[in-house]
Amino acid sequence: MGTVNTSEFRKGLKVQLDGDPYLMIECNFVKPGKGQAMYKCKLRNLLRGTVLDRTYKSGDSIETADIEEIDAQYLYRQGDQFVFMHNENYEQYELTSDQVDDAWKYLKEGMNCSMVLFNSSPISLTPPNHVVLKVEYCEPGAKGNTASNVTKPCKVETGAEFLCPAFVEMGELIKIDTRTGEYIERVKE
Amino acid sequence: MSFDDPQHEPSGSDYLPVAAMELLRRRADLLRQVRSFFDNRGFLEVETPLLSADTVVDRHLDPFGVECGGRTFWLQTSPEFGMKRLLAAGAGAMYQVTRSFRQGECGRLHNPEFTIVEWYQPGHTMRQGMTLLGELAETILARGPAESVGYGEAFERYAGLDPHKADAAALARAVEEHSIAVPASLDPDDRDGWLDLLLVHLVEPRLGRERPTILYDYPASQAALARVRPGPPPVAERFELYVDGIELANGYQELTDPAELRRRNTRVNRQRARDGKPTLPVESRLLAAMDVGLPDATGVALGFDRLVMVALGAKSLADVTAFTWDRA
């Protein structure tokens, strides 16, 4: 495992503290005129999301974290386990629903996602920014109402519920922004 | 702009200045004002070498070394040595606007290359030096007359302890009580290290809020090139100007005793070696000049880039610097 010196500190650095991976989200160089140079850092735990304040003296070093981002295809769900496959070496990874978090709402078999590995084990999953999902159930559309500001709930093929405009019909395909969970548009086959 | 990665690769728009042209024009106006402040008071504007065989020996200042014909020359960390040699030669009151260089100092308030305004006034006491610094701040920033607060008084007020008396353990306890993150590598006996932590977290942010604040009478252990006034407690006749919690200038009642400077240089070099840093030359032409005689004087170094930043209400040096380190 490598180490990184304060002179290389910057936002976005991935480091390891007490065995957990952290992302440096803030790093401020402070130095009283004739005094000790220090780096005041904020670090986010990539497993728990908690944020730590740490101060380092100029010249200190920390362990870097073995973090890798890979493209992985969603294969299937087995109970609480979501199974993915590394697109390059076909290795399979099982993620718990905790690790998958909200992404389950968008997962369709064969979908390419981005997965973060820490010491070769998956720790998080990000679906594509936009996904197209089939509406399995919703109240019938209001005829002639093309206003998109009137919304209603709809249930899609993954079992998740979203809000869509009143004119959307069962069986239609809708595009959702996975970062916000918001409806974007209707799409044709 | 992002100021996080000094080593990044050149890319398409890297040639552009980072500061807005309008702020660079106002920076030029401020430089003219600073120059006329000193010109009107009869200070001589001088120039001294940026690259010198001598350098300041400071525990926390790392100069850039440049190899020339088998010898190491140093880019100045401030124009102090050259100007004091002029002082010893009888130049009288003088000022200089010049670039200075400090390795590894990079951030919102730091750039490894920056502009210093430095001046010397022979015959002045520390109090007179503080008054002149306050006048400059009032003239340029128009934030009212400066107030003065003793280093000890500021620590009593904001950290609840006496920085001249408290031992390292008491300082460490205060740091813990205020939930300040402590670098794991900080030596528990490093009294100045604990004082710096308290200064940065509890004291500095409160200084210069209403009007410019001058902090003075520093711990004797932080004298650098200032004279120490015998106690009790002994204090370094050092003073610093703060505005909006940002340190703008550092001044000394100048140390004139060459034997004392040699002792400090030797002590600092021992400390640098313990810190894993290269030692720096103890002897210098400044010491040669001091052996002959340096007049009593005050000297002040002011970070011009920070002054501009504060005067224009900017958030970062990058807002008022044409090309920062990452585009140098």
Image (spheres, helix red, strand yellow):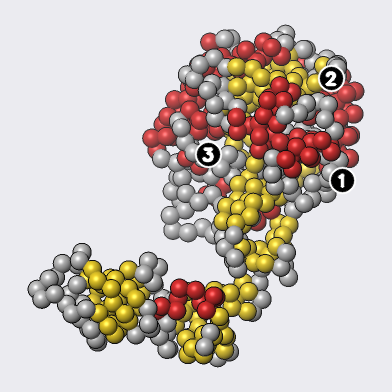
Camera-side mark, 3 or 2? 2
User: For the residues marked 2 and 1, what is the alpha-carbon distance in whole angstroms?
Assistant: 27 Å
Picture quarter containing residue B148? Answer: top right
Which of the two labelled residues, at mark 2 and mark 1, occupies the earlier sequence position?
2
Element assignment for label 2: loop
What mark, if any, has residue B86 been given in the picture?
A: none
Marks 3,2: beta carbons within 8 A: no
Q: Closest to the observer: B14 or B207?
A: B207
Amino acid carrying mark 2 in the image: Pro
Q: Badge 2 is on which residue?
A: B233
Q: Secondary structure at mark 3?
A: helix
Disc sitting over residue B317 in the figure: 3
Q: Secondary structure at mark 1?
A: helix
Residue under the image location 68 percent in, 25 percent down:
B157
Residue B287 point in image, percent of width and height: 84, 25
The residue tagged 1 is B274
- Counting from the top left corner in percent of width and height, residue B213 is at 60, 22
Whether residue B76 appears in this view of the structure is no
